[in-house]
């Protein structure tokens, strides 16, 4: 075996080891304050929609929530990069990539389901708020190994909330601002509290 091939194999092994460490290390890139702020943002958006956009069509309804989700993802993403690089140093990029890989399937599934329902079954769009909460739950459960142990409680909340929203609106399908605002508001504040208490849990 040539020295060049030995070097390539050694470099590949190093990359694989770093990736495995990143997947198994407790990720501290998520900031409690920003997570809580996104929950308050969701509650505020629900209030705005209930007062000024009551009875609006699906386009206005989902347009607002997609905008809220984009703002929330931007805030969380920006802080995550800064915190991870400060806390995790040389492993930051690998850990951020690992976190994205854990959440991406659920995020993509939520977007694709929304697209399919909008194009092929618009009468079923009332299912989306509950389904989106279920997908968030799936993403959190997938990332639970690298998040504080209490993160599973937030994942369970989103799962139960999503199923409850679907069950509550099944009898009279409608697009309620509170079907989005309350579950996401409570869920994000709960997750923020879990992240805030994580260092204390670790000390225990």
Image: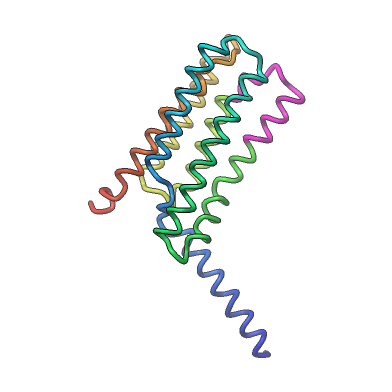
The residue located at (71%, 30%) in the rendering is 115
Quadrant in which the N terminus is drawn: bottom right
Asked whether residue 121 is drawn in magenta, I would say yes
Left or right: residue 7 compared with residue 95:
right
Most foreground residue, 114 or 153? 114
* Image position, residue 92 (x, y; %): 48, 60
* Image position, residue 70 (x, y; %): 58, 36
Instruction: Say if 125 sits above or below 142 in the image.
Output: above
Left or right: residue 28 compared with residue 72:
left
The residue located at (43%, 47%) in the rendering is 30
Which image quadrant for residue 69? top right
Which image quadrant for residue 114? top right
Most foreground residue, 75 or 12? 75
Q: Give the range drawn in magenta.
A: 110-128
Left or right: residue 136 compared with residue 153:
right
* Image position, residue 44 (x, y; %): 46, 23
The colour scheme applied to this rendered structure is: rainbow
Question: In the orientation shown, which residue stands out farthest toward the right?
Answer: 120
Most foreground residue, 204 or 84? 84
Q: How many labels does the image show?
A: 0
* Image position, residue 154 (x, y; %): 41, 36
Secondary structure that dominates the magenta span: helix
Instruction: Say if 193 sits above or below 128 in the image.
Output: below
Most foreground residue, 118 or 46? 46
Asked whether residue 65 is drawn in magenta, I would say no
Instruction: Say if 192 sits above or below 184 in the image.
Output: below
The residue located at (25%, 48%) in the rendering is 200
Left or right: residue 38 compared with residue 103:
left
Question: In the orientation shown, which residue stands out farthest toward the bottom?
Answer: 2
């Amino acid at each position: 075996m040539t020295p060049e091939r030995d070097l390539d194999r050694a470099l590949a092994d190093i990359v694989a080891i770093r990736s495995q460490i990143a997947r198994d290390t407790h990720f501290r890139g998520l900031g409690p304050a920003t997570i809580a702020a996104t929950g308050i943002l969701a509650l505020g958006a629900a209030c705005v929609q209930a007062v000024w956009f009551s009875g609006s069509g699906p386009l206005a309804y989902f347009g607002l929530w997609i905008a809220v989700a984009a703002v929330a993802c931007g805030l969380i993403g920006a802080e995550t990069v800064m915190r991870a690089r400060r806390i995790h140093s040389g492993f930051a990029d690998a850990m951020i990539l690992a976190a994205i890989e854990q959440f991406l399937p659920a995020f993509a599934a939520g977007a694709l389901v929304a697209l399919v329902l909008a194009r092929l079954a618009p009468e079923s769009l009332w299912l989306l708020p509950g389904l989106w909460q279920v997908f968030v739950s799936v993403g959190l459960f997938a990332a639970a190994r690298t998040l504080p142990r209490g993160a599973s409680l937030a994942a369970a909340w989103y799962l139960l909330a999503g199923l409850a929203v679907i069950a509550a609106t099944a009898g009279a399908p409608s697009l309620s601002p509170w079907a989005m605002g309350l579950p996401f508001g409570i869920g994000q504040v709960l997750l923020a509290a879990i992240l805030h208490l994580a260092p204390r849990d670790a000390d225990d």
